[in-house]
Amino acid sequence: MNLHPLSSPRQASGRGLSLRKNTWVPAYGLPGRRIVSITGLISFCILTSPLQAADTPAPAYGDAYADSSIGDASMLNPVLASDSASNDINNQVFNGLVKYDKDLNLAGDLAESWEIKKKGLVIVFHLRRNVRWHDGAPFSADDVLFTYEKLRDPRVHTPYASDFDDVESVKAPDPYTVRVVYKKPFAPGLASWGMGIIPRHVFENAHNPEDFNTHHANRAPIGTGPFRFKEWKTDQYILLEANPDYFLGRPYIQKYIYRIIPDQAVEFLELRNQSIDAMTLTPDQYKAYDAIFAHHNRFRYPAFRYVYLGFNLKNPLFQDRRVREAIALSIDRNALVQGLQLGLGQPISGPFAIMSWAYNPHVTPPPYDPSRARRLLDEAGWRPGPGGWLQKDGRVFSFTIMTNQGNKVRQLCSEVIQQQLGRVGIEVRIRIMEWSTFIRNYIDKKDFEALVMGWQLGRDPDIYAMWHSSQQKEGQYNFCGYSNKEVDRLLVEGRETFDQKKRQEIYWRAHELIAADLPYVFLYSPDELQAVHKRFIGPEVAPAGLGWNFWQWYVPEKLQRYKTEMIQ
Amino acid sequence: MIPYLLRRLLQVIPTLIGISIISFFLIQLAPGGPIDQIADLNPHVTPEVKQRISHDMGFDQPIPVQYARWAGRMARFDFGKSFNDGRPVLRKIAERLPATLLLNILSILFMFLVAVPIGAISAVKANSWFDKASTVFVFLGFSVPTYALALLLMIIFGLELGWLPISGLRSLSFMPMPLTARMLDMARHLVLPTLVLGLTDLAGLSRYMRNSMLEVVHQDFIRTAKAKGLSNWRVYGVHAARNALIPLLTMFGLMIPDLIGGGVIIETIFAYPGMGRLGYEAIMTRDYNLVMAITVISALLTVLGNLLADILYAYADPRIRYAGR
């Protein structure tokens, strides 16, 4: 389930996410290492260093890992599902051809290796041999073809079809080779093959044809991953068990339980009670007394999302860049991070995830400088009038910030901005709206002045959909109306360049330009906060987050809590 | 009586049609649709893809056409499939119904068992210390927010004392247990939600009982009974209570639809897999088929519940007979 009364759909997904196990956020992929330059980033790793001491106990098989989420999965089929709970499970049950490693570089998964030919027009994947589906059938290139057919089938309700729009053909010259031909080079395309591969023999049953969208296997998945599906009690729990034939070796943890606990306060009580082993924490839970975490370790790492104040650039009020800059200078980002995230996050300067190699560390967020803001506004013709509000041609500088209902952080964020802009003489009103109404009637119709929203970003830095000037039609994502010829060119180039070094240069430049144009005031990127029971050895924060090596986690024999026969 | 019943039953049909039309149009008029779950602010999903899926599911048709299709399917008792997970909505409801019925029956039972004696004693001993204390108690239960009460009980009995599980319907080690242990396990999980659900509605019911009892105890036949020298138990427990309980039958009839409609808040707090969460999530995700199925079934039960209350009324109170009307 995507929705929770306390958050927007997308936001709920973010919070429901419990462990980002190599988290596959399909497409928008290919990040690698990023130079860590922002103070504080390094300290995470020290703060949250796992308990891998010198005398680490020997790995042992057994025990169960009780994870939790505020929302249930919808479909355990990677082609159809996009919510975070489904992704959490699908990541354990399925494999893509490629995956992101701990440093966010693309690595082989079901494909042992790949070649990029003809300047990116052709990608040839060499598949692993001897991989078996959980039901024992052998995995082959034919399954990759099937997955692709379904992604392109107009009758299949997949949210990922557009990632494969530029594919001309996919062929299997032999059972262990897949040859993908693109119409034009598409760099994010390689990462899009991290899509979980689904088995043809399960879905194409001649005796019992079923509609793919409502197929029974969407609730009882058969994959190739480290864990096999065992049981799903809707809105109660999902149970997986270790796959002894996993191609990278059998996972140590025998059972994986995914409990659905829709209320975060209750989830926290269950954690304290040790009836669950892991959960996503809120900032105030993370900052709770140490005694509360007697049995759990806390982990913290930058999220692949950010919060922003976006302008409607078609609105005359915001067409003067000086005005936008003045607003940016009047907002104290550090105060926002302190107040809303209790310091568990960091100010950002541009449109990329702070851990991505595309994020340009040389661009700094605008400083908090209200007096310079006043000067800029004065230059733009806004002078203080009666009541202290700025005026120009008899009009008071006043606008409305819209945000969606149910997201407490965004509401508070709007209020802080209202207060901070009030100090320089700008009157801000706040309007909070039900999610669907907000999207359909205001964002899609571009009927807003400014909004406080957030973006959840993929691992690949392609941001064409949000920033290219062609993406401004109703229902598209450049709803602020941003358009810059050079950025357009760079975003197209970024999609066509496979070389990561060159691509980084392109995106650093785009970052610089977008930051200078100020279509958004980029506010901050929150941290992902996780608790994991102390008996598990192996959790380690990396650029990819936590859980990227989950199949290698273990509990030393003496500390095992659940006898595996207890849970079936 | 029989013609009256038949007439009432026939009235159910137009009522249901009316309810289904209103709710169908209302939910369709709310902005958004089922596709938003995968498409809203998801840069992977282009408007063309949205359009295509929408067309494939028939959402691009005018609402009256969609209603006609839905009604056509309904005529064959086909409630359709959920857009969220592709399963038949009836199956989803059937999966949730037992848990909800169990919790609601338990809590209504608890409510009546506690509220009736409290109300009756309060009336007989009106303005005594018991009357005042019980009033304070039931109103406390009524005014403390469910959420706070539930968390408080969870902390005391779950976390601190460790007597009861905090949330859920069963333990992780449920399946391998022998049958008796399973029943005990579920019973332990049900204690807190039953208590919280029952306590919050105790006030209304016990006040009802108190008022109706007060009315009865001042009537002549009670005085006669006392004058005859009957014991207090026979006067109040038998003669008075039987008459005082009649209005409560109406309350009970009105509670029948509640039996299948779970409370969203209580189910969310206790991570309880009931109808309340199902319905709430269906509305929030615009899962039209599921919303409609739940609406139609609850409407049917509400109408039938009212009918049942009327019949019980006639049975319990000889002064009321419907035959002539």
Image: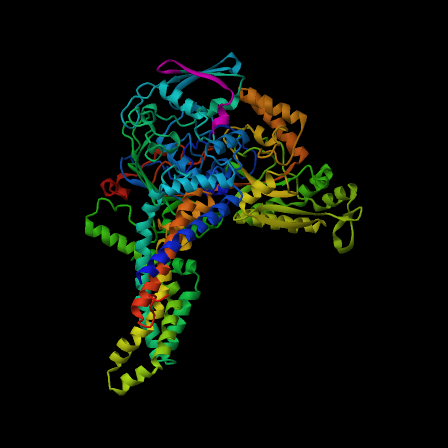
Q: Position of residue A119 (x, y in %)?
A: 53, 14
Q: Residue furthest right?
A: A393
- Residue B258 in view: no
Which residue lies at the image location 35% right of the left edge and 76% below the top edge? Answer: B213
Question: In the picture, residue A126 is in which quadrant?
Answer: top left
Split into 4 quadrants, where in the image is the N terminus of chain B?
bottom left
- Residue B281 in view: yes
Which residue lies at the image location 47% right of the left edge and 47% below the top edge? Answer: B21
Q: Position of residue A145 (x, y in %)?
A: 40, 20
Question: In the picture, residue A179 is in which quadrant?
Answer: top left
Camera-side residue of B278 and A388? B278
Is A325 positioned to the left or the right of B138 in the image? right
Camera-side residue of A179 and A15? A179
Is B39 positioned to the left or the right of B274 in the image? right
Q: Position of residue A425 (x, y in %)?
A: 72, 50
Q: Is residue A165 magenta?
A: yes
Split into 4 quadrants, where in the image is the C terminus of chain B?
bottom left
Magenta highlight range: A160-177
Residue B206 vs A302, above or below: the answer is below
Camera-side residue of B269 and A297? B269
Q: Is residue A458 magenta?
A: no
Q: How many marks?
A: 0
